[in-house]
Image (cartoon, rainbow, N blue to C red):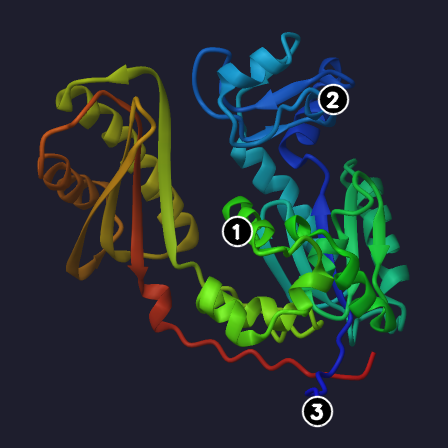
């Protein structure tokens, strides 16, 4: 007998090309043009691309060189994260007018549990429309939304009618929706896993559902149970309004590769200063310092050290970073350096989140 899971009303709101849209909003000369936030035609990685640029295959995480090759007319714009944070805070305030059960995933997306909401509106679909309209009226940007009985389905649905659209998957539609869904669109199934599933004859949800939990565990380990459940509409993860930060990081990709530790120390001082500011903003400190090094061949290395006490000051962070840097010789020139602090004092603060469940 299948376990009965109480339905909730979950909205996943995802801003449309957020960083790029903010830049186009603030600079009218960029509107309607293909732009990439971050990177350059010579170096770096694209952080976000406008929809005009996406038509040419420009997307986040590809190199600036490849982006420019795909779209010769591409305009590169330097990121302004303080501005994105400012806009994100305005959007978050709108969310909290509807529910306190808001779980931000990043600056540009969040889950909202509106099972019980401040507006007393029983329709999650109408609430999503209202929220998106308010974001447009009050902020000037468009958002897309997915609405369903759990976070997993809502997140998938939010991608369906982008940009500036929404999709509702009602309780009686969940199973048929998931059965027909291409496996590559399942949230949590990456490129490598998709290829592996194809080799096993799994192309859509219906083939995934035909496999036993034993089969899925054999081929995908612990993730097998997750796949077995979600294709049946079972996803118990609740919207957590108190998300505890587990690490804080800062990094930089350089226009010219660094080949000397002396130059690297200079850059790491700047990165450590940026990290210190973020730590103060979040009012946290940590015990584990990690140095991230990406070489010119794109191979990556991390070196970590855990202290017996919490730190947040730049001087103490850079002291540990220098020790990690000189731990072993560089194997090649360096294109990216990053510093992160984890094992934070936030992990000692216990939050109890009470989330009520009701019928849909």
Quadrant hosting residue 171: bottom right
Q: Is residue 97 visible?
A: no
Residue plotted at (56% across, 50% down):
199
Mark number displayed over residue 13: none
Mark number displayed over residue 196: 1
Mark number displayed over residue 1: 3
Q: Which residue is mark 2?
A: 52
Q: Is residue 321 above or below residue 168?
A: above
Quadrant hosting residue 135: top right
Quadrant position of the N terminus in the picture:
bottom right
Q: Is residue 308 visible?
A: yes
Q: Residues within 10 Å of mark 2 (few under 14, many from 20)?
A: some
Q: Secondary structure at mark 2?
A: helix
Mark 2 to mark 1 CA distance (whole Å):
33 Å
Which residue occupies the foreground of this view, 225 or 333? Answer: 225
Which residue occupies the foreground of this view, 99 or 179? Answer: 179
């Amino acid at each position: 007998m299948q376990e009965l899971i109480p339905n909730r009303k979950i909205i996943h709101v995802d801003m449309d090309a957020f960083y790029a849209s903010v830049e186009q909003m603030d600079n009218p000369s960029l509107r309607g043009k293909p732009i990439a936030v971050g990177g350059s035609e010579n170096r770096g990685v694209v952080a976000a691309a406008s929809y005009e640029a996406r038509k040419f295959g420009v997307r986040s995480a590809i190199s600036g060189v490849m982006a420019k090759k795909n779209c010769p007319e591409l305009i590169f714009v330097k990121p302004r994260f303080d501005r994105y944070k400012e806009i994100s805070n305005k959007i978050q305030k709108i969310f909290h007018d509807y529910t306190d059960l808001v779980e931000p995933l990043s600056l540009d997306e969040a889950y909202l549990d509106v099972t019980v909401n401040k507006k007393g509106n029983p329709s999650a679909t109408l609430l999503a429309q209202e929220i998106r309209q308010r974001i447009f009226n009050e902020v000037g940007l468009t958002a897309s939304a997915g609405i369903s009985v759990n976070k997993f389905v809502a997140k998938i649905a939010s991608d369906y009618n982008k940009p500036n659209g929404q999709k509702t998957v009602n309780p009686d539609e969940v199973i048929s929706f998931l059965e027909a869904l291409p496996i590559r669109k399942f949230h949590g199934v990456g490129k490598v896993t998709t290829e592996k599933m194809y080799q096993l004859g799994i192309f859509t949800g219906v083939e995934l559902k035909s496999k036993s939990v034993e089969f899925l565990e054999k081929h995908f380990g612990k993730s097998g149970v997750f796949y077995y459940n979600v294709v049946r509409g079972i996803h118990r993860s609740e919207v957590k309004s108190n998300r505890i930060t587990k690490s804080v990081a800062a990094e930089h990709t350089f226009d010219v590769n660094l080949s000397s530790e002396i130059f690297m120390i200079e850059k790491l001082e700047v990165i450590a200063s940026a990290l210190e500011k973020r730590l103060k903003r979040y009012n946290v400190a940590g015990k584990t310092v990690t140095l991230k090094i990406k070489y010119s061949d794109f191979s990556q290395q991390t070196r970590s050290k855990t202290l017996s006490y919490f730190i947040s000051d730049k001087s103490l962070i850079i002291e540990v970073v220098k020790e990690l840097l000189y731990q072993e010789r560089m194997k090649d020139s360096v294109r990216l350096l990053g510093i992160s602090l984890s094992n934070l004092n936030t992990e000692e603060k216990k939050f109890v989140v009470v989330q009520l469940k009701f019928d849909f």
